[in-house]
Image (spheres, rainbow, N blue to C red):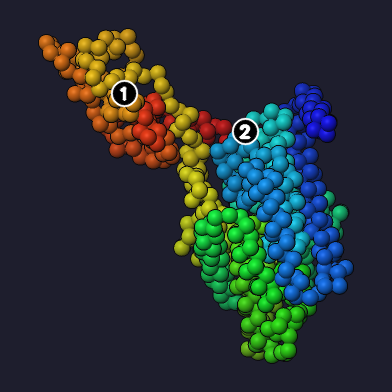
């Protein structure tokens, strides 16, 4: 009964939207949808944030065990376990974790995301982070907003371009709601998720992002959002500090990326999700016991450092010391092990992202560098400035998003006076990592799991296309034993100039090109009955169903200009049809028009 009510409600809502679609102009309806997506994505993000706040209040602030380190080390095991259970048993294949899955959906799935994505991330990420998992909420917020935009576009039968715009609006609103940073929200969608939006689309995108920031500001205020205001003016004499910080941020981002992929590869060898959960969450528990500051997102710890400069001495490692160098080393350890804590959380089955950890790690790096010089006697080092700029350095190096890093750090902290050091650190960090890693953290995973190449727009558009949609089967097929007489008879009634030769199991054995056998056809052949297709065929280069478009183009380029049609086979070598080079180029041109 409940399912029938839900379906009826859905159809009534869709009927209302379709009514609006008929009554409004195309631009008016699209703007209305963008504003609605922005509001819904913001509300979903706010619900997730408040869900985490309530869980933390119930399990820690109002609990008599809340301040005990061993208790904080155990709760993430429960949170990650519940999250993993929901992902594996309830949402199953419909659950897409990671920004790379959104990029794949945009490229390969016509920007369609499962409807369950609109709410599943709220539950799973809330349990993971609310009970102490060392990751961030921004990636689930992005996934939720993207799903809301995608499903609204699909429900109202919008074409690909407009549906992708709604998806981008949901993403921008999610990030904007998380930080109260509307410009950073837009840049996140453009830089990190590679969403190609035209200049004309910026207005609805701006409106959606502003809506998200406004709602978050009204409902959450400054208490839940990451904000601190005691920024000092930029002093050019500290430029060498920022250059060094940029180099260190690049090296640390590179270490984060390679550590994450190494541990993720090791965890993928475990047979069951239970094994990944137990090992990952137990290792995380040990790290939290030693370094309690890696518990949860870590924003509160960063705000404490920025506002007071004090380090909570709730770890057994520094509980009985006031030596500032030992405390400084403890912060260095917290910064490094935050990387491992985040990796264990995500690979162990928890749901979250690396965006918040990158900000926290970057802030700790800035603190470590600034505090180091303060301990050496340079009292005028701007510690808060170093924290803010360090955040930008890690985001830029980890996600290859220097503009997002610059504007996010500036918007969140009101550090607009720091644009010069923000640009210096973001640029240096980006180029350091880019020297050794061609792809960002999540885009590397996307490239490994699919044929998509997110580094180049032309290649990315080409990789959106799939060979299976270009196969033509209306070509004559000959058996190995088909005689020349029979071949000529079929050629007379066919408009094709290339033919496949297969065996009895339909395995492709070769190809016959009309131009190559003209001399045989035109010349007198008294032995035509004795010549077979197997005698005159060529063992031509062939495409496979697993080839991507780039490798297909390369195979065409190796042939002479007359061979612009190639056969394609399946994994077993069975003939599927022919694909022409012209059809690939026509499809590519159509894709450019579609996305421009």
Q: Decide if residue 98 is in sight here.
A: yes
Identify whether 52 is placed above or below 586.
below
| Residue 147 x %, y % | 69, 42
User: Which structural element holds mark 2?
Assistant: helix
Q: How many marks?
A: 2
Judge from the rendering whether residue 7 lies leftward or rightward of residue 468; answer left or right. Answer: right
| Residue 422 x %, y % | 63, 66
Q: Choose between 325 and 130: the one closer to the eye.
A: 130
Q: CA distance from mark 1 to mark 2?
A: 43 Å
| Residue 26 x %, y % | 72, 28
Disc on res. 160? 2
Q: Decide if residue 238 is in sight here.
A: no
Q: Choose between 244 and 320: the one closer to the eye.
A: 320
Where does label 1 land, which residue? 504
**Disc 1 vs disc 2: which is toward the camera?**
1
Task: Tell me where residue 490 sits by quadrant.
Answer: top left
Residue at 65% across, 49% down:
88
Q: Quadrant of the image for the C terminus?
A: top right
Identify whether 551 is placed above or below 517.
below
Identify whether 98 is placed above or below 312.
above
């Amino acid at each position: 009964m409940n399912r029938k009510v839900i379906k009826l409600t859905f159809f009534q809502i869709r009927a209302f939207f379709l009514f609006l679609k008929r009554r409004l102009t195309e631009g008016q309806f699209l703007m209305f949808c963008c504003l609605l997506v922005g509001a819904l994505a913001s509300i979903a993000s706010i619900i997730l944030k408040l869900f985490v706040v309530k869980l933390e209040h119930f399990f820690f602030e109002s609990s008599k065990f809340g301040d005990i380190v061993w208790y904080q080390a155990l709760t993430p095991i429960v949170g990650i376990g519940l999250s993993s259970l929901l992902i594996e048993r309830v949402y199953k294949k419909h659950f897409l974790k990671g920004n790379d899955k959104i990029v794949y959906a945009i490229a390969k799935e016509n920007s369609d995301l499962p409807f369950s994505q609109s709410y599943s991330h709220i539950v799973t990420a809330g349990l993971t982070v609310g009970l102490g998992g060392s990751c961030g909420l921004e990636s689930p917020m992005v996934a939720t907003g993207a799903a809301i935009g995608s499903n609204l576009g699909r429900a109202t039968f919008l074409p690909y371009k407009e549906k992708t715009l709604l998806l981008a609006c949901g993403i921008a609103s999610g990030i904007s709601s998380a930080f109260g940073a509307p410009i950073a929200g837009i840049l996140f969608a453009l830089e990190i998720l590679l969403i190609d939006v035209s200049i004309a689309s910026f207005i609805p995108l701006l409106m959606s992002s502003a809506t998200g920031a406004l709602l978050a500001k009204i409902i959450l205020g400054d208490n839940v959002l990451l904000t601190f205001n005691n920024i000092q003016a930029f002093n050019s004499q500290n430029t060498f500090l920022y250059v060094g910080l940029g180099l260190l941020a690049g090296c640390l981002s590179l270490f984060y990326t390679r550590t994450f992929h190494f541990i993720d590869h090791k965890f993928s060898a475990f047979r069951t999700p239970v094994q990944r959960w137990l090992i990952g969450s137990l290792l995380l528990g040990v790290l939290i016991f030693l370094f309690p500051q890696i518990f949860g997102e870590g924003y509160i710890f960063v705000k404490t450092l920025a506002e007071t400069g004090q380090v909570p001495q709730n770890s057994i490692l520094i509980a009985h010391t006031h030596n500032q160098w030992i405390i400084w080393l403890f912060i260095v350890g917290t910064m490094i092990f935050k990387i491992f804590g985040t990796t264990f959380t995500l690979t162990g089955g928890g749901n979250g992202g690396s965006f918040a950890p990158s900000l926290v790690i970057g802030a700790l790096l800035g603190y470590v560098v600034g505090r180091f010089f303060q301990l050496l006697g340079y009292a005028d080092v701007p510690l808060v400035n170093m924290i803010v700029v360090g955040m930008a350095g890690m985001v830029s190096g980890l996600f290859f998003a220097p503009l997002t890093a610059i504007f996010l750090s500036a918007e969140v902290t009101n550090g607009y006076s720091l644009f010069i050091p923000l640009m210096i650190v973001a640029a240096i960090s980006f180029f350091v990592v880019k020297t050794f890693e061609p792809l960002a953290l999540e885009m590397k995973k996307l490239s490994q799991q699919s044929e998509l190449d997110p580094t180049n727009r032309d290649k990315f558009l080409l990789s959106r296309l799939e060979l299976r949609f270009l196969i033509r089967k209306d070509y004559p097929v000959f058996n190995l034993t088909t005689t020349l007489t029979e071949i000529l008879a079929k050629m007379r009634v066919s408009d094709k100039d290339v033919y496949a030769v297969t065996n009895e199991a339909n395995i492709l054995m070769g190809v016959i090109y009309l131009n190559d056998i003209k001399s045989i056809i035109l010349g007198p052949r008294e032995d035509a009955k004795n010549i077979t297709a197997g005698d005159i065929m060529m063992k031509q280069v062939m495409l496979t169903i697993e080839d991507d478009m780039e490798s297909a183009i390369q195979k065409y380029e190796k042939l002479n200009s007359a061979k612009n049609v190639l056969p394609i086979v399946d994994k077993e070598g069975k003939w599927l049809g022919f694909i022409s080079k012209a059809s690939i180029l026509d499809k590519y041109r159509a894709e450019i028009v579609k996305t421009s």
